[in-house]
Amino acid sequence: MKQKAPQNRRVARPMAPVADDAPPPLDEPTEAPARPRVPWRVRLRPLLTGARLALGAAVFLSTAGATSYGLYRYVGTSARFRVARITVEGAKRRSDEAVARTAGVAAGANVFSIDLDAARRQLLADPWIERAEVRRKLPGTIAISVGERQPISIVTLGGVPYLAATSGRVFKRLEPGDPDDLVVISGVGGEGEMLRDRASVERTVQRAQELAAAWEQANAPRAFSLQEAHVGKDGTMSIIVGRDPVVLSLGKPPFREKLARAARVLTEIERRKAQASIVFLDNEAHPERVVARMR
């Protein structure tokens, strides 16, 4: 007969085998690995290194600042860097002393105290000076180089004479001591036109200068040197040549062939020992025709 198990006793169940490498049960706490202890000297090492770097940088900056200030005081006060020599090249209308004075450069000044750009601007304010360069040459030299304008004609603006350089550049009023043996250009307008439209006036002056240069190449007798070039209001041009003035009425461009014919006519007039007052070369319908009015 089969026996019954007691009611208050549990039947033990067999446990499943556990592998050696299986993780521990979830309900059993896992101990954290112990952290190695770092000595306090090791922990302070980065802080000490940063402090040393900061201190070194501060010492370096302090030393550099003191050195820079000392150098600044030296170059600013040392007699070695005083201007002992001023050289000037290219000046003909102005003396070397006048050029240096215009630039604001004086002997004895500290060579580093001179504003080179300001000195150049002051030189270019002189109407005679077209270009300028100012340089230091250590320890105590200031070198100035200038290029002066070359006047080639006198332009009358409303009866007031001005000097003009190449390309028609009108740069200053004619004053005592300025060259006055130049070709006169008239009829280009007054000072008001110069203020309103300088570029247009100077283009007209340039055309008159080119006409004057073309006459010099026309092989005319030497007695008929150019005295004046006149610009008409309608754009026509005429020139006055010779000691006993002869007017060559040229009309409108081109002028080169007209000037060559005028040179041949004047050569013939000189050969005949005659005198002309006006030679007309302005017949646009028949440009080959030349009419001379005799005295």
Image (cartoon, helix red, strand yellow):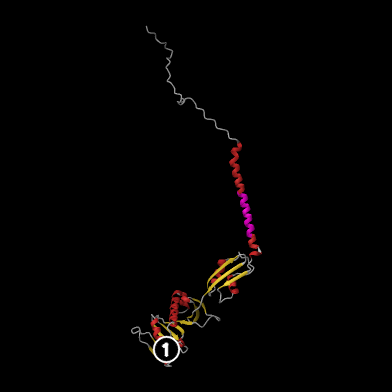
Q: Quadrant of residue 207?
A: bottom left
Where are the magenta residues, as a range? 57-72
Residue 276 position by quadrant = bottom left
Q: SS of the residue at dot 1?
A: helix
Residue 293 placement (x, y as % from top left): 40, 90
Q: Residue at 61% across / 51% down in the picture?
A: 60
Residue closer to the observer: 195 or 214: 214
Q: Is residue 64 above or below residue 132?
A: above
Residue 189's spot in the image, x, y percent?
45, 79
**Residue 99 within the segment the image draws in magenta:** no
Please give the name of the residue rendered at 63% of the width and 55% of the height, measured from the top-left corner.
Answer: 67
Any part of residue 187 in sight: no
Residue placed furthest toward the top? 1
Residue highlighted by disc 1 = 267
Q: Is residue 196 depicted above or below 53 in this figure?
A: below
- Magenta span contains residue 62: yes
Relative depth, front residue between 217 and 181: 217
